[in-house]
């Protein structure tokens, strides 16, 4: 068999293993073993290369941001940020929906994870939205789809991974997703305000005397300040050159601890130990998966699969627009079957030569990959963020399906294509701040 046939069989094997819900490390380990047997890849050299990659200081940022996010989920930060936002939109019909979108964006700026967004905000936001008259399925859908902003609003874990595997500036990759992230916040907020007009049961915040209302607003603002300080410290430190993304992740984890223990007093020592234990288990599984995925991706690179992809694609068409549409469809399908980190590690090195050949900057491609893979987190069959949101919101798939499709098709998909075909959306900030010339 020629090498392309072997690679095709290997990809089919990987998809079949994924469809049988086999743990991800074993899926990629099985695909790697097949390449070693049928493709002649040296498992020994791949193991040595993989271990060498795993000691990269950049990788430290991912588990630390996960730890920070888990601590934040138990510390009450989301509750106080929500109360603070109510000051501005509590009297507006549909305002709590806008708060849900904005809060998920802020939480994303702290944790860099979509899972943390829905885990931290869902238990607070969904019940409050239901109390105000929102249908449970709609409330769950809005919070869940908004949680993918954690993968786009910097610092983002998948952008750290992208910068690492493609040797692109991580700070430039962070900035590239800001424009699409803000566009999605605006898009979801507008859709929410339109949809709530057809919800007659929505109630607004109770009227209070002005003096009492002023006191409530002051209390909420003071309570929210520690939570608001986290994204300011993290992002200000990174872009101010005070510390690297890895150091920022450590700062986030360290600062979140006193906020939970002594300021909000909503975290106890047993809670902290449970968080550390859960984080350790998650990090172990993630790092094992990353290593096998890296090794498989590098095997494809050594076998010149990227060059073969370029030749095959250009033999079909050389129309730039059609090619970019096909790339977006491919990334969307990848996001449907694997998680964002896996997709980033496996696909970025393979497609980067193709998109650069099309004149797409690696920084813009970071944003293109980010918005596509993030959408996979709420798109079955993978849809890990969607399933977590359903458990937290205590609703059935039939309840969440319609509003999720509305937000994705009308609010999210246009931003995906805007990111792809209008470079300034993702390139303006990196260029303005001198990370791209």
Image (cartoon, rainbow, N blue to C red):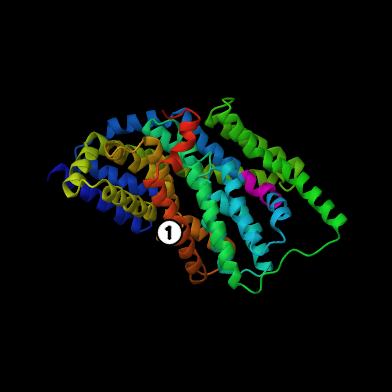
Residue 115 position, x and y percent, is 53, 51
363 on left or right of 296: right
Q: Residue furthest bottom?
A: 200
Q: Position of residue 60 (x, y in %)?
A: 50, 33
156, above or below 78, in the image: above
Q: Is residue 79 magenta?
A: yes
Q: How many marks?
A: 1
Front position in the image: 76 or 427: 427
Looking at the image, which residue is at 39% across and 43% down?
344
Q: Quadrant of residue 309?
A: top left
The vertical placement of 325 against 33, above or below, is below
Residue at 16% in and 46% down: 315
- Residue 285 placement (x, y as % from top left): 46, 44
Residue 23 appears anywhere in the view: no
Check residue 52 for magenta coloring: no
Q: Can residue 87 be seen by looking at this rendering?
A: yes
Q: Secondary structure at mark 1?
A: loop
Q: Which residues are magenta?
A: 71-80
Q: Which residue is mark 1?
A: 379
Q: Is residue 195 above or below residue 288?
A: below
Of residues 365 and 30, the one nearer the viewer is 365
Question: Residue 145 in the image: x percent, y percent?
Answer: 51, 57
Q: Quadrant of the C terminus?
A: top left
Q: Quadrant of residue 2?
A: top left
Q: Nearest the camera: 206 or 424? A: 424
Name the dominant secondary structure of the magenta segment. helix
Say few, some or many: other residues with alpha carbon within 10 Å of mark 1 (under 14 / 14 to 19 / 20 or more).
many
Is residue 147 left or right of 261 when viewed as pictured?
A: left
Residue at 45% across, 50% down = 374
Choose between 408 and 48: the one closer to the eye.
Answer: 408
Check the image and name the residue furthest to the left: 1
């Amino acid at each position: 068999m020629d090498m392309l046939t072997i690679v095709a069989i290997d990809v089919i094997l990987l998809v079949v293993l994924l469809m049988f819900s086999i743990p991800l490390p074993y899926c990629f380990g099985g695909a790697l073993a097949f390449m070693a047997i049928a493709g002649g890849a040296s498992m020994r050299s791949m193991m040595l290369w993989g271990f060498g990659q795993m000691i990269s200081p950049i990788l430290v940022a991912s588990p630390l941001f996960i730890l920070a996010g888990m601590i934040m989920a138990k510390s009450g930060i989301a509750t106080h940020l929500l109360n603070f936002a109510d000051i501005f939109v509590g009297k507006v019909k549909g305002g709590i929906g806008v708060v849900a979108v904005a809060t998920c964006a802020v939480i994303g700026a702290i944790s860099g994870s979509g899972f943390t967004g829905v885990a931290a905000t869902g238990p607070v936001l969904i019940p409050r939205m239901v109390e105000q008259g929102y249908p449970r399925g709609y409330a769950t859908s809005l919070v869940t789809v908004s949680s993918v902003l954690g993968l786009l609003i910097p610092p983002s874990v998948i952008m750290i991974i992208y910068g690492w595997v493609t040797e692109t500036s991580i700070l430039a990759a962070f900035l590239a997703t800001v424009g699409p992230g803000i566009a999605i916040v605006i898009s979801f907020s507008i859709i929410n305000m339109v949809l709530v007009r057809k919800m007659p049961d929505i109630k607004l915040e109770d009227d209070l005397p002005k003096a009492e209302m002023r006191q409530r607003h002051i209390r909420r603002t003071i309570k929210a300040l520690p939570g608001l300080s986290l994204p300011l410290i993290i992002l200000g430190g990174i872009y101010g050159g005070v510390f690297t993304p890895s150091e920022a992740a450590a700062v986030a984890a360290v600062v979140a601890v006193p906020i939970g223990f002594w300021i909000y007093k909503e975290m106890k020592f047993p809670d902290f130990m449970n968080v550390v234990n859960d984080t350790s288990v998650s990090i172990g599984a993630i790092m094992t998966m990353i290593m096998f995925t890296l090794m498989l991706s590098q095997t494809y690179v050594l076998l010149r699969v990227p060059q073969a992809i370029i030749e095959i694609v250009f033999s079909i068409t050389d129309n730039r627009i059609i090619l970019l549409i096909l790339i977006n469809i491919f990334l969307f399908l990848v996001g449907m079957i694997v998680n964002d980190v896996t997709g980033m590690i496996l696909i970025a090195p393979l497609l980067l030569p193709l998109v650069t050949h099309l004149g797409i900057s690696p920084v813009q491609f970071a944003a293109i990959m980010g918005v596509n893979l993030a959408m996979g987190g709420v798109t079955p069959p993978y849809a890990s963020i969607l399933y977590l949101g359903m458990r937290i919101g205590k609703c059935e798939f039939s309840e969440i399906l319609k509003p999720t499709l509305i937000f994705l098709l009308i609010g999210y998909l246009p931003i995906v294509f805007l990111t792809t075909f209008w470079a300034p959306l993702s390139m303006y900030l990196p260029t303005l701040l001198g990370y791209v010339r």
